[in-house]
Amino acid sequence: MNTLLKKMMIALLAVGIGQAVWAEDVPNLKEIMLKAESGDAEAQFFLGAMYDIGQGVRQDYVQARKWYRKAAAQGNSNAQNNLGMIYAQGYGVRRDYAQAVKFYHKSAVQGNVSGQHNLGMMYARGTGVRQDDVQAVRWYRKAAGQGSSLAQYNLGEMYFEGRGVRRSFADAQKWYSKACDNGDSRGCEKNLRLIPEYLILITSPETSRTKPK
C-alpha cells in the first residue's frame, strides 16, 4: 500500500438517499493532484471526494463528478458509489436516477457495502429501476452481512413488513438488534417496540414459531 493510501481513511456517512463514501485526513493537495492527473484511481477518487465536500478545496460538484468518473472508469468501487450519489442527488448535474442505479450496481457487484445498500434502496423505492422487493432484500442482505447498520435496519423493515420475504418478527428483531448494536438508534427503538409483539407472537398457540434467518 502506497503512502497516499496509508493516509486515506474511508468513512461511511448517511447522506440523503443513501450512503456516500468520503475520504478523510487530507494529505498534501499537490501530491493528490499529481497522482490523480497521472491516472492513479485512488487519488482520483480522493480528489473527487475533496471537491464533493469542500475539504481542502472549494466545493465544486462539477469537479467532483469529473474525478469520480475518471476513477469509476478504472473500476474504483468507492468512486462508482459516490458518482451514483451525485446523479441521485443532482449535485452539479441534472438528477438522473437511472444513471445512479447504473453506478450503484457497478459498485455493488464489486462488493462495496455502500453501493450494495444504495442499490437495495433504489430497488425498494422503485427509483430509477422497476420496484423489486426481492432485489432490495438481496442487496440489503449483502450490505448487512458486511456490517452496514443502515442495511441491517432496512432489512429489519423488510422482514417486519413482509416485503420481498415472508413476514417474520423474529428476523425483523434480529436485524433491528444488529443495527442497534452498530449504533443505529432507529434499530434500538424498533427493537424495543417489537420485543413485546414478538413475545406475544411466539407464545400464541395459534402461531408457529419462525427461526431467524
Image (cartoon, rainbow, N blue to C red):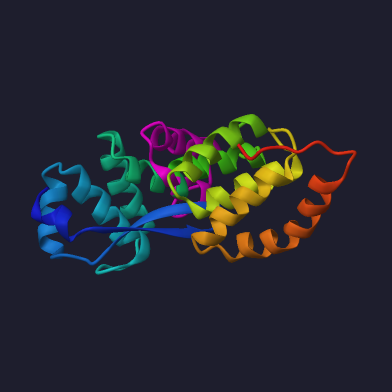
Q: Residue at x 83, y 52 (%)?
A: 200
Examine the rendering and report whether any part of residue 131 can be seen: no
State the image coordinates of residue 16 (x, y, percent, origin top left): 54, 58
Q: Residue at x 89, y 41 (%)?
A: 205
State the image coordinates of residue 197 (x, y, percent, origin top left): 80, 55
**In the image, residue 48 above or below residue 54:** above
- Count up the numbered dots: 0
In the image shown, does 166 or 128 lie closer to the viewer?
166
Examine the rendering and report whether any part of residue 164 can be seen: yes
**In the image, residue 198 above or below residue 137:** below
State the image coordinates of residue 99 (x, y, percent, origin top left): 48, 37
Quarter the C terminus occupies: top right
Residue 26 falls left or right of residue 208? left
Is 100 colored magenta in this rendering? yes
Q: Residue at x 55, y 49 (%)?
A: 152
Residue 164 falls left or right of residue 45? right
Is 46 colored magenta in this rendering? no
In the image shown, does 172 or 47 lie closer to the viewer?
172
Task: Tell me where the magenta segment starts and ends, as one range.
Answer: 86-114
Residue 58 falls left or right of residue 30? right
In the image shown, does 192 or 67 lie closer to the viewer?
192
In the image shown, does 204 or 174 lie closer to the viewer?
204
Q: Residue at x 32, y 41 (%)?
A: 69
